[in-house]
């Protein structure tokens, strides 16, 4: 077994670093990211992150599968609670400060020229929508001391699957603690890598394929197809605020619930088939599992460059390429959709301007229509150069939540949304992704995502941008269209129609 570090190199690295990665190459031409997840993680805590290039309609080159978390971070309004190798710790303060403080405790050893994210240590997980109320005061939003605002994990094992080469690399992240014997630690690492390598090479059949025994089938449209009167009134109230000049736009949402009986990972397996997206993920935090296929980046930080991709404007997919083209042309010529999109691009420019070098913010792509599995969206890109004084968490603070899921002006829109929804959104319109200890961050908006609570309840939520010309019934239909892929996934998996 060829390793990325010799024993001597590992021992030398412990002199300056407290996180050291040792890795080995795997041949996985008979495996997929899904089978690797089953072998590495199974029903335990862990994650898988994948991507599809929607312009090319093909899976991205790399998939990331993390298993055996040795750090779990829980985010609260006034502290972090950290379970680190079974020892409980806390850091007092607001989330953007405590997350920066915790990340600063780690010094990764970058010795092999590896540039992929998370390989040398980092945190993967989510923040809820309400985390934004700890960044800026949102009137009416009260966050209790025990309200969970996010969870992150750092995993001992990371498999990076390379679809181009049909191979994978297995990384073991060693955390070096005071008093550790570096030579003995290296020997333990090599033993564990050898054991995991053998486990990944072994034949495997999933054990979660027992059919559902529910007595009545799931049918979301039978239950939710008619617009609820109270939600239509919410849209009318928001329009009144717009006509009064309080806001230009707001994005109310609607929540759908369904009891489930099948294992959570089956829903991810089906979702990645029916709704391939730029951000596909499954996170198992135990009592909470996130299953998502988000189309929209919140922010990406690479080096000193920050990227964001606002999405606003939706049409259903056509049955043919010709119909798709007609619907795309209709979207581009829709004055309401274009005005809404331009407003949100301006909001993104302003957000990035708060943390970017003056004059560096630009818009390389404006109002291009991209096709996804069930809908087409109007998409732009906004890019800036991060000013030296700011860290990735500062960038997140400046941009979160996205205007595309809140409105404009952002804070007033958030206040009005809270007045109307009368409940915390939780995972919906929050953000999911990673921040590593080399300054990289990639966070999507938590859209097209279901939260599975206690393994028996699936929660789905989607929203629609309301402007002065909005028609309430049409906006509710847009909400249903955005949730359609998730509805189909739950119905097929629960009704034993998936993987037949």
Image: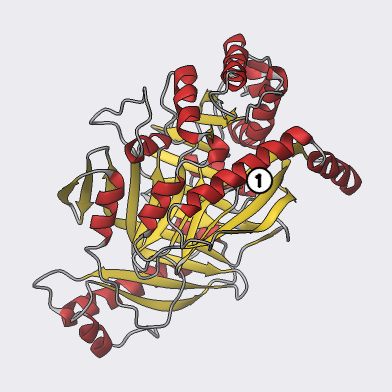
Residue 149 or residue 336, whichever sits in front: 336
- x 38%, y 32%: residue: 454
Q: Locate the C terminus by quadrant.
A: top right
In this rendering, the count of numbered labels is 1
Residue that protrudes farthest toward the top in the picture = 229
Image quadrant assignment for residue 155: bottom left
Q: Locate the N terminus by quadrant.
A: bottom left
In this orientation, does residue 162 appear? yes
Q: Residues within 10 Å of mark 1 (few under 14, many from 20)?
A: many
In this orientation, does residue 210 appear? no
Image quadrant assignment for residue 464: top right
Q: How is the image coloured?
A: secondary structure
- x 50%, y 44%: residue: 265
Q: Is residue 428 left or right of residue 99?
A: right
Task: From the top left corner, tell me how far across and down residue 405 is, in percent.
Answer: 54, 36
Task: From the top left corner, tell me how far across and down residue 65 is, in percent.
Answer: 45, 60
- x 46%, y 63%: residue: 357
The residue under label 1 is 275
Is disc 1 placed on a helix, strand or loop? loop
- x 68%, y 18%: residue: 472
Q: Is residue 99 left or right of residue 343?
A: left
């Amino acid at each position: 077994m060829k390793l990325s570090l010799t024993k001597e190199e590992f021992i030398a690295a412990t002199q300056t670093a407290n996180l050291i990665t040792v890795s080995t190459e795997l041949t996985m031409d008979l495996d997929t990211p899904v089978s690797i997840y089953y072998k590495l993680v199974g029903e335990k805590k862990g994650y898988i992150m994948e991507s599809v290039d929607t312009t090319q309609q093909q899976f991205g080159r790399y998939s990331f599968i993390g298993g055996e978390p040795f750090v779990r971070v829980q985010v609260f309004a006034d502290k972090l609670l950290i379970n680190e190798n079974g020892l409980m710790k806390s850091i007092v303060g607001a989330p953007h400060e405590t997350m920066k403080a915790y990340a600063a405790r780690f010094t990764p050893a970058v010795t092999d020229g590896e540039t992929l994210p998370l390989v040398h240590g980092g945190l993967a997980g989510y923040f809820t929508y309400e985390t934004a109320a700890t960044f800026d005061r949102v009137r009416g939003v009260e966050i209790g001391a025990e309200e969970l605002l996010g969870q992150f994990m750092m995993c001992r094992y990371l498999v990076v699957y390379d679809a181009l080469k049909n191979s994978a690399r297995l990384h073991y992240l060693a955390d070096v603690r005071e008093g550790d014997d570096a030579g003995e630690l290296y020997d333990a690492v090599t033993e564990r890598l050898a054991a995991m390598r053998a486990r990944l090479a072994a034949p495997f059949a999933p054990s979660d394929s027992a059919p559902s025994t529910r007595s009545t089938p799931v049918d979301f449209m039978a239950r939710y197809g008619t617009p609820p009167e109270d939600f239509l009134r919410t849209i009318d109230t928001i329009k009144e605020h717009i006509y009064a000049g309080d806001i230009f736009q707001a994005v109310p949402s609607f929540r759908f619930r369904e009891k489930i009986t099948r294992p959570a990972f089956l829903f991810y397996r089906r979702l990645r088939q029916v709704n391939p997206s730029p951000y596909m993920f499954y996170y198992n935090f135990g009592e909470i599992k996130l299953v998502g296929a988000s189309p929209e980046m919140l922010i990406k930080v690479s080096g000193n460059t920050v990227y964001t991709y606002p999405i606003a404007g939706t049409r259903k997919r056509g049955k043919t390429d010709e119909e798709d083209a007609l619907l795309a042309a209709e979207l581009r010529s829709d004055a309401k959709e274009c005005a809404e999109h331009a407003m949100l691009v301006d909001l993104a420019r302003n957000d990035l301007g708060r943390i970017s070098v003056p004059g560096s913010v630009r818009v390389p792509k404006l109002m291009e229509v991209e096709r996804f599995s069930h809908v087409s969206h109007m998409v732009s890109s906004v890019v800036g150069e991060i000013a030296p004084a700011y860290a990735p968490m500062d960038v997140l603070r400046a941009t979160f939540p996205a205007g595309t899921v809140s409105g404009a002006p952002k804070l007033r829109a958030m206040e009005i949304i809270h007045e109307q929804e009368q409940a915390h959104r939780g995972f919906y319109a929050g953000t999911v992704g990673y921040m590593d200890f080399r300054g990289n961050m990639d966070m999507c908006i938590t859209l097209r995502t279901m939260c599975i609570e206690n393994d028996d309840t699936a929660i789905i939520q989607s929203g629609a941008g309301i402007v002065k010309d909005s028609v309430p019934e049409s906006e509710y239909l847009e909400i249903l269209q955005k949730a359609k892929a998730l509805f189909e996934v739950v119905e097929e998996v629960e009704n034993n129609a998936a993987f037949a």
